[in-house]
């Protein structure tokens, strides 16, 4: 069970994707964006504060298709799917 909440929007997206992480405690989040075949497109390390954290990612140069964003936040791991138009 996770005390963290994750929201990814807009979905589908064209130029930018926004990730909101509501965390129970401060820490570091490792964020990977992978294509449908599992290939890592980008990796980010972000510092999170307790409460709501918002991160924006430029996806304008991505090919059209389905992508996965994985978030490792402490002991918590979430995978979210989005569509690039």
Image (cartoon, helix red, strand yellow):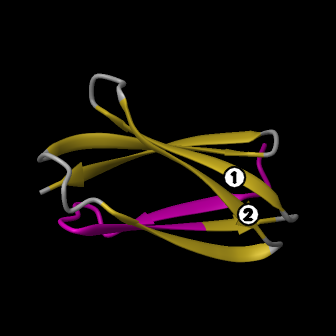
* Whether residue 3 is situated above or below residue 16 in the rendered picture: above
User: Magenta segment, which residues?
Assistant: 1-20
Q: Quadrant of the N terminus?
A: top right
Q: Which residue is mark 2?
A: 47
| Magenta-drawn stretch contains 11 | yes
Q: Position of residue 41 (x, y in %)?
A: 36, 39
Indicate which disc residue 29 carries: 1
Residue in the picture at 69% in, 52% down: 29
Rendering coords of residue 82 (x, y %): 31, 51
Which residue ends up furthest to the top in the rendered image? 37
Q: Residue furthest right?
A: 25
The answer to which quarter of the image holds residue 76 is top right
Residue at left offset 27%, top offset 59%: 59
Whichever of labels 1 and 2 marks the residue nearer the N terminus, that label is 1
Q: Assess whether mark 2 and mark 1 are in contact (beta carbons under 8 angstroms).
A: yes
Looking at the picture, how far across and down is residue 72, in whole percent?
67, 42
- Mark 2 packing: few (<14 Cα in 10 Å), some, or many (20+)? few
Q: CA distance from mark 1 to mark 2?
A: 6 Å
The residue that appears at 59% across and 42% down in the rendered structure is 78
**For residue 64: magenta?**
no
Left or right: 20 with respect to 73?
left
The foreground one among 63 and 53 is 63
Residue at the location (36% across, 24% down)? 38
Q: Secondary structure at mark 2?
A: strand
């Amino acid at each position: 069970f996770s005390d963290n909440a994750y929201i990814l929007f807009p979905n589908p997206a064209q130029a930018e994707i926004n990730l909101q992480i509501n965390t129970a405690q401060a820490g570091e989040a490792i964020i990977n964006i992978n294509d449908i075949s599992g290939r890592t497109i980008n990796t980010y390390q972000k510092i999170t504060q307790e409460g709501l954290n918002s991160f924006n990612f430029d996806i304008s140069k991505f090919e059209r298709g389905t992508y996965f964003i994985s978030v490792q936040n402490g002991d918590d791991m979430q995978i979210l799917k989005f569509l690039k138009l």
